[in-house]
Amino acid sequence: MPKLVDHDERRSDVLGAVWRVIERDGIERTTVRAIAKEAGYSAGVLVHYFTDKRDILTSALELSHRRIRARWAEKLAGRSGLDALRELVYDNLPLDEERRLETRLEVSYWARALSSDDVLGVQRRESSELRDAILGLVREAQEREELSRCAPAQEITLQLMALIDGLSLHATLHPHLVTDEEQIKVVERTFADMAR
Amino acid sequence: MPKLVDHDERRSDVLGAVWRVIERDGIERTTVRAIAKEAGYSAGVLVHYFTDKRDILTSALELSHRRIRARWAEKLAGRSGLDALRELVYDNLPLDEERRLETRLEVSYWARALSSDDVLGVQRRESSELRDAILGLVREAQEREELSRCAPAQEITLQLMALIDGLSLHATLHPHLVTDEEQIKVVERTFADMAR
Amino acid sequence: MPKLVDHDERRSDVLGAVWRVIERDGIERTTVRAIAKEAGYSAGVLVHYFTDKRDILTSALELSHRRIRARWAEKLAGRSGLDALRELVYDNLPLDEERRLETRLEVSYWARALSSDDVLGVQRRESSELRDAILGLVREAQEREELSRCAPAQEITLQLMALIDGLSLHATLHPHLVTDEEQIKVVERTFADMAR
Amino acid sequence: MPKLVDHDERRSDVLGAVWRVIERDGIERTTVRAIAKEAGYSAGVLVHYFTDKRDILTSALELSHRRIRARWAEKLAGRSGLDALRELVYDNLPLDEERRLETRLEVSYWARALSSDDVLGVQRRESSELRDAILGLVREAQEREELSRCAPAQEITLQLMALIDGLSLHATLHPHLVTDEEQIKVVERTFADMAR
DNA sequence: CATGAATGAGTGTTCATTCAT
DNA sequence: TATGAATGAACACTCATTCAT
């Protein structure tokens, strides 16, 4: 009987190592050797679980997205309308160390999306999921009159998504200037404006 | 009698080539050879004008920032208050090909800022300039009652900066979903909310 | 109660897979993994039947040689002299798909014989068998006056062997220039010349 | 003033090193590192003169072909008909150390031609040149009645080319069985037969 | 100043082989 | 026996950098 390994688990191990190496060394210095070492394997093992480096990097981003979505699902359970929307927006902001890590990971891939269709595809899919979720909740909130019906739901959605990524970026690159409290204030003001 | 060379002009030539190579090949595939070739020089020349690749890349970003600021200065001349603020925000959005290129260049460096203090420094300086400009105009607009005084100027400034970068990113990565008109609508709505 | 495995049969399975992989991918891209996969086994099994890759490749050549010799034995049964000699020469030319495959396999190993004594040994043994067979039949044919006695049997034998390999090579590398008919014509003319 | 290098000469240096490495280690163990080392350069230099390993190996074969053809041109000068034909055939046999090396090089590439269209192309071009040269001389010899007109020139040409490669291969793989004298005897007998 | 040849470390990837199960 | 996970060396190739000219 050969030693059997849970492929998905092994992939997760490696992808977790990818996150750590990107966080530590930067994505442009993230090599397969460094990933393997961080994961505790030799460089040759990765070939069993991934086709190539491209596959490793896009998979690492996808796994992060999956975890983020799983967290939504949990947090949004039992909520609806503006309440759920507020939860969703906050969940996508770097307001604790876990989400700050996620944001830095995300930012690391933005540049690559400009020249890699694979990465762009992964990001568009994720962006699309978030947009759909936000759009649905915006409509729900408008029906309940929790948000003003003056603005089209599409427009509000774009405004919120831009706010999320803009705040995430500023809080990531300029943490000394953008505190958690300031992020929250801006979000609350935005929601207040949208309610009128 | 040595050949006299305008150092600054030569540097600008090279840095312009950097922009084109990044745009064409992506920043992670931008090599010094490709830059030299694009600029029409041999690979070895760059050593006379830059200390190393790091210097070339950060200088290219700095030059872009200088050009953007020069454009503001021109556009903002004779304007003030909300009028100037609106002009400044629009000038920082990817609403024509020139600014779309600038945005893609900026996005290309965001990931590098996470692992390079040099790049981070350049971006913080630029960000700081923009923040100061926006903050000054916000205060002016509030004094003239063009913007509501309910919100602190600092908060409004952060909201606008997040909006700029968030919209820029979405318009860059998802141009099929974010048209120029939508960017304008979101900006106008934001200003309208801020005026109340 | 251990599972009993017919070693020779297993070896033949694997060696047949070697032929197919060499034919499909080229001998320099023939890997043990590809061989194992083609044979329907896992990569690690081969260790039970072969000492290493070198052993696998030389064994594959040897098995091909054994099959070719078995075919002679059958075809030459009941024949003798020039009749048998002609049969033997034709049997060593790539005149149908089976023998074209054998020729390509043989050609694949020629280069390796130059730097591998193992492969060289296998090929010398096979060459020696063919030479002895041809030499015997040449002598028989000369005794029966089916071939001229002017030339020494050794010389005729070398001429025929060179003809076989030379035609095989040309028909293999330049199939558009060397048809089956042309091979036959050249062989017949050679026999006719030898008969005089 | 930079150090200027004669590119063609450098290429020749490297390609000569390729021949020596193939001769010494075998073509399948011929690495770019070994080639560079043999040529006295570092591995990275080759990039200045060749696009990749494929280019290096095919160029090495092409250069050998060019040298062989240059030797013909010299040897055939002032000769014609059967005399020139005989000279040409002998020149293509491994009858001295130089030509034995050339033959081993040629044999080394035969297997690669089966799976590399580049190598096949180089060999077909060379083969085509030799065929044309032989065919022309055969026709000339037939016109002068130095060779019999019974056989078509095409057929005689194929017979001679097969003889050349067949003898070359046997003399290379089985030098203890095929002496220079035996090669010459077989060639002379073949010409004698063709003359009748 | 400028050239481009040259270096050598480092990249992603392949693969024969080993070995615990 | 048979598996397939794992290794580690080797591969071709890239590239920032150095340097004699």
Image (spheres, coloured by chain):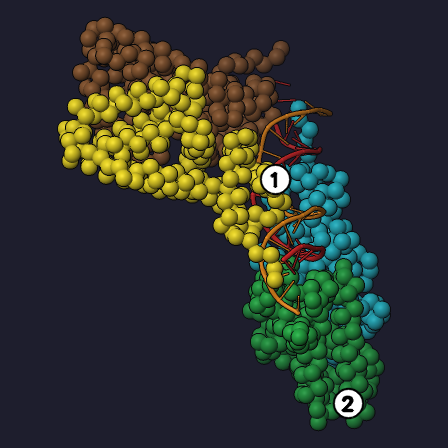
Chain colours: A cyan, B green, C brown, D yellow, E orange, F red
Position of the N terminus of chain C, as image quadrant, is top right
In front: C109, or A116? C109
Task: Assign a secondary structure to mark 1.
Answer: helix
In front: A184, or A196? A184
Q: Position of residue B182 (x, y in %)?
A: 60, 77
Q: CA distance from mark 2 to mark 1?
A: 72 Å
Amino acid beneath label 2: Ala
Q: Residue at x 35, y 32 (%)?
A: D91
The residue wearing badge 2 is B141
Residue C121 shows in this picture:
yes
Q: Is residue B11 above or below residue D77?
A: below
Q: Position of residue E9 (x, y in %)?
A: 72, 47
Task: Assign a secondary structure to mark 2.
Answer: helix
Q: Residue at x 36, y 24 (%)?
A: D167
Q: Is residue D25 left or right of residue A159?
A: left
Q: How many marks?
A: 2
Q: Is residue F7 left or right of residue B178?
A: right
Callout 1 crowding tier (Cα within 10 Å): few <14, some 14–19, many ≥20:
some
Chain to which the residue tagged by mark 2 belongs: B
Chain to which the residue tagged by mark 1 belongs: D
Q: Is residue D151 above or below residue A46?
A: above
- Res D37 label: 1
Q: Quadrant of residue A101?
A: bottom right
